[in-house]
Image (cartoon, rainbow, N blue to C red):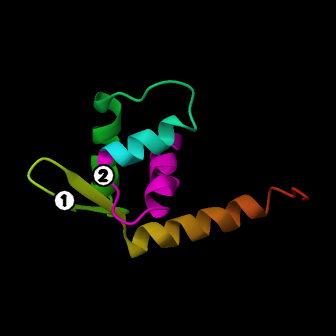
Amino acid sequence: MNDLSGFQRDLLYVISGFDQPSGQDVKSELEQYVDGEINHGRLYPNLDTLVNKEYVEKGPLDRRTNYYAITEKGREALRERRGWEDQYTAIEA
């Protein structure tokens, strides 16, 4: 996952939390986290990168809308990332 940008990692985290969200669903969810609007010219090329790297699969929901779903490779990348992060963060509740 070290080959992904921070934005691509954020997309992967959001997609992993849903069952086949559309691009618009991902955009809406991520916009609640970031300050500002995410335009289509940024969103969809980055989603395509995740698909091309096989972290995410894409399929049709209807004639105009695609879904995105995390793959096993994507899940494993998130688990590895979490393990790497955990060794550097000691946040107590």
Question: At x 87% / y 56%, what residue is drawn?
Answer: 91
Identify the element where label 1 is drawn.
Answer: loop
Residue, far top: 36
- Range of residues picked out in magenta: 1-23
Which residue in the structure is indicated by mark 1? 61
| Kind of residue at disc 2 | Ser
In the image, is residue 81 part of the stretch drawn in magenta? no
In the image, is residue 16 part of the stretch drawn in magenta? yes
Residue 90 horizontal side relative to residue 31, left or right: right
28 relative to 48, above or below? above
Disc assigned to residue 43? none
Q: Residues within 10 Å of mark 2 (few under 14, many from 20)?
A: many
Residue 21 horizontal side relative to residue 2, left or right: left
77 relative to 36, above or below? below
Q: Residues within 10 Å of mark 1 (few under 14, many from 20)?
A: few
Residue, far left: 63
Residue 86 horizontal side relative to residue 60, left or right: right
| Kind of residue at disc 1 | Leu
Q: Residue 58's x, y, as percent?
A: 24, 60
89 relative to 74, above or below? above
Q: Tell me which label, 1 or 2, sits earlier in the chain.
A: 2
Question: At x 60% / y 68%, what residue is drawn?
Answer: 80
Q: Residue 79's x, y, as percent?
A: 59, 70
Q: Residue 50's x, y, as percent?
A: 35, 54
| Labels 1 & 2 near each other (Cβ < 8 A) | yes
Identify the element where label 2 is drawn.
Answer: loop
Residue 74 horizontal side relative to residue 35, left or right: left
- Near-viewer residue (70 or 33): 33
Which residue in the structure is indicated by mark 2? 22
How many marks the image carries: the answer is: 2
Question: At x 51% / y 56%, what residue is drawn?
Answer: 13
Q: Residue 48's x, y, as percent?
A: 27, 48
